[in-house]
Structures are given as structure tokens and as C-alpha cells.
Amino acid sequence: WVNASSESAVRKEFEKLSEYLRSPEEILIDSDSRIQLVSRRLNQWKASWLLIFDDYDDPMSFRNIQDYMPQSDQGHVLVTSRDPDTWRLGEQLQIPAITEADALSLLLASASMPNADGADKDGLKIIRRLGCLPLALDQAGSYIRDRADAMTFTAFLESYETEATKIWNSTPTIWDGNAKTVFTTWELAFSRLD
């Protein structure tokens, strides 16, 4: 699983992978040799493997991602991205947002509140606010569950709106609404640690 948000991120991830893939007697003196080792090892691998390049959302700033993709009959490469320009890398699979019914089920399960009074109505407000994004819903549900003594769905929405106002004014302008939504639920969860 490789962070593909930038070329420097991929290089760092490949350098880490090289530590697992190199033999003890191999001495790799520079970054390029460590990166080449990863591709070489995966190309030689006899068993099936999967390499995931995650978060490749800015192809214009990192056009040579294919240089990091091993070419092997045994392996498969998966690229996750929100940018439709990735069609040039191969077959694309669009993953739509989940339905409101599935989103509500996920939120209720994550919050451990499957049969709570009024949970459906208040849960619908949350899933609509979070745009049926599974990661944001799971984070929200976990946050609510971990604060079950003091957190209702209504209280969560109030906390979310307060946090969103602060965060959305200071996030990078290239972030879309999905990224901001997920980041806000993530930030709420981390604020619990303070």
C-alpha cells in the first residue's frame, strides 16, 4: 500500500518497502537503488501480488507514476484517485457514493446504536451532511460510540458544524468537499485525544 499523493511520497514508501524486500547481504547506498530494488523484486516474484497506489489525486503534478509500476504477469497494480484523468493508466472503475439506506446502516453500526430511539431521523441528517461518504460515516460513528455517555447524533452534528467552520477556512483550496468532510470527522476524532 503506497501513498501516491506525490512523487516524493512514493519514493519514501518504496524506500521503506526495500527494507523488507532486500536480502541481508545487499547494500543499497542511495535512494534510486532502493527504489529500483522494489520494482525488480516484484517483477521477479513468483506468487501473485497486489500493489496499491493510494490517493493519486493530482496527476498533473506527478505524471510519471507509471515509472514506479512494476511490469509483471504475477502482479497487479491498483490506483485509487478522485481525478478522472487517471484513465490513461488503464481500466477505470467508478465507485459511486453508497445509498442513504446503506449509509444509515453503516453509521448506526459504527456508532453501536442500531435500535436507538430517533436514531434513524437524526442519522439521516448526519449522512446527508457527510454526503454518504463511508470513511466519514465510519469515523463519525466511532466518535459517537466512543463518547456514548455524552454524544447523541444531534450533539455530533453541532460539534461537526463548529469544527467544520474552523477547518474549512484553513484547509488547502484544492481540497474538494469530500476531502474536507473526511478531514473534519478525522479532526473531531483527534480532538477527543486532547
Image: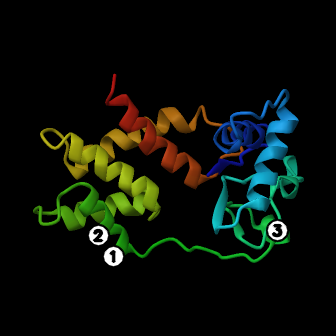
Residue corresponding to mark 1: 101
Kind of residue indicated by mark 3: Leu
Q: Which image quarter: residue 89?
A: bottom right
* Secondary-structure class at tag 1: helix
Q: Please state the horizontal and vertical placement of residue 95, each as a whole percent of the image.
A: 58, 73
Kind of residue indicated by mark 2: Ser
Residue corresponding to mark 2: 105
Numbered label attached to residue 89: 3
Residue 112 to residue 173: above or below: below
Q: Please state the horizontal and vertical placement of residue 56, each as a whole percent of the image.
A: 72, 54
* Secondary-structure class at tag 3: helix
Label 3 to label 1, Cα distance in Å? 33 Å
Residue 160 shown left or right of residue 133 in the figure: left
Residue drawn at 71 percent across, 41 percent down: 22
Residue drawn at 22 percent across, 67 percent down: 120
Label 3 to label 2, Cα distance in Å? 34 Å
Q: Please state the horizontal and vertical placement of residue 146, each as a whole percent of the image.
A: 22, 42
